[in-house]
Image: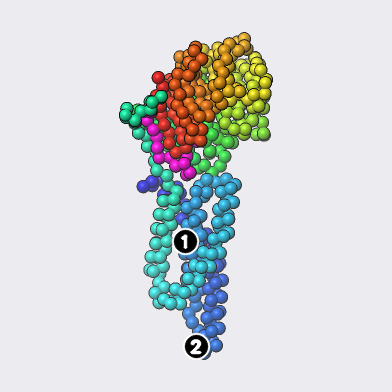
Amino acid sequence: MDIDFIFEIVLPKLLFSTIASIVVGAVVGGIVGTIVDLIRRKRAKSKNLPPPPRLVLSAIFGSFFGTMLIVFIPIQTDRSSLDGGGYSVLWLYTLLITLTPIGSIAGALFGCFVGAKWQRKFTVRNFAIALGVVYLVMSMAIYGALVTPTPQLSKITKSEAGTSFPLIAQISGYDRNKNFVQHMAFTPDSRGLAIGSKQDIRIFDLQSQQITKTFKLSGQTLNDMVDRLTFNSDGKQLIMAAPRQIQIRDLQTGEIQHRLDARNEVYPTPDGKKLVGFSAKGTYSDLLVWNLPDYKLSKTISSELMPWEGINSNPVCISPDSKMLIFAPNPRNNAIRVWDLDAGKLIKSFGSNDGKQITAMAISPDSKQLLEIHNKNLYLWDIDRGKIVRTISNIGMARAAFYRPDGQTIVIHTERSIELWDLQTGKPIKTLTIPSFLARDFALSPDGKTMAVSQKSLVKIFQLP
């Protein structure tokens, strides 16, 4: 049983439901009880009978219980109550407006019926028992509907290994509807994998198969939804980019040390001295550069990027020597800009400007060549000369590309596969076929030996040759 979930989610929901039900029950129950009392007294008077006992209190109690059970169980067990957002709020208000009259009035009438039939049994003790049963039912309903199992990492035996890339481990337990995987990142030493979901960020040790860190996310604002995860160069800080904020978190304490006014993407330099992100205001985004470790904004690079266009609509990469920032400013073109990060100046511009969008870019380990993919073809550029030195055709629609440390092999994530290519021969070495609707995210370890593929509720970890 998840005790933290009970204290953080279940109990606050019970408290809110109780307060709201008391208010609704007092108003609706009071009105219904008064009307029922007037009708009963009128009938008794017409038959010359003594006035019957009043049922207002019974109606209030009944309306309270009816509101708790009929109104707030459906609302508080709905996933939208955790997600937040405009559509979720609209849906919850619809439920509230629809169910409140039904639950409160039906409960009040039932309370009047019980009060009329068993007036003497309507005691404080019986009320306390009924209240306890209602709380137990609500607690079990909320816990059962909203709690998610703890993800588990398990090793894969040799008999279960894949045929192209050996499947060495998998992480299961994520929920494709409640708590699906949004982004992944390997730790700098390649021993751990950080997985960001709707509810939390967990760091898995791939050797011990244990979860070493868990950071809860509210997931109810655009500041706390995982768009991208990465680590700083020494692995002591976890950096998360959300739709409206970048958060830098200390891995030891779990505390958020800095919140930056930026969005969607974040790129720390390999030397650990700078951080690059998208500005958070306006339709178009400029690139912002912060100096570390104080995270003071040092430069704004005019770029007119459009992060809202979608994943990889604005390929951005930093050279391994931390000197160059390279990006394609127009998501519908393949113009390439090379900036000096220290000077904050444009030093080179090249590209064919043929109207075809660049979908993936990567810089070679020696920082001399740029790999870019557009129009389903791969182009190798000599960065210093701004010239294409190699073209490989029919790569496919790439989502991302990564150099391995040897500088001779690359990993390409396409719409339907993950492929290992040899740049010298210009041919694929191995291919892992994955339906596009399953492969939600992909990550390659810094040592180039391991890759992780998420399928919304499951993460598979493969070994590269």
Q: Residue furthest top?
A: 385
72 in relation to 122, above or below: above
Which residue corresponds to the image point at 43% horizontal and 40% vertical from the top-left? 174
With respect to residue 55, does 315 lie above or below?
Answer: above
Q: Residue furthest bottom?
A: 48
Q: Position of residue 418 (x, y in %)?
A: 48, 26
Whether residue 153 is visible? yes
Instruction: State how far apart marks 2 and 1 are (Cα).
Output: 36 Å
In the image, residue 36 sits, relative to residue 299, either above or below, namely: below
Q: What amino acid type should be assigned to the residue bearing mark 2?
A: Leu
Residue in view at x 54 percent, y 87 percent: 45
Under tag 2, what secondary structure? loop
Q: How many marks?
A: 2
Residue bounds of the magenta highlight:
167-183
Q: Is residue 399 left or right of residue 187?
A: right
Compare residues 133 and 317 and report the one nearer the observer.
Answer: 317
Task: Return the residue at label 2.
Answer: 49
Q: Position of residue 436 (x, y in %)?
A: 51, 33
- Of the residues under marks 2 and 1, which one precedes in the sequence? 2
Residue pictured at 44% horizontal, 21% vertical:
430
Mark carried by residue 16: none
Mark 2 or 1: the one toward you: 1
List x then y, in percent, for residue 248: 51, 31
- Give left or right: position of 31 versus 351: left
- Figure check: 90 above or below 305: below
In this figure, which residue is indicated by the disc labeled 1?
69
**Category of crowding for the residue at label 2, using alpha-carbon neighbours closer than 10 angstroms: few (below 14), some (14–19), many (at least 20):** few
Q: Nearer the viewer, residue 111 or 144?
A: 144
Q: Is residue 418 magenta?
A: no
Q: Quadrant of residue 259?
A: top right
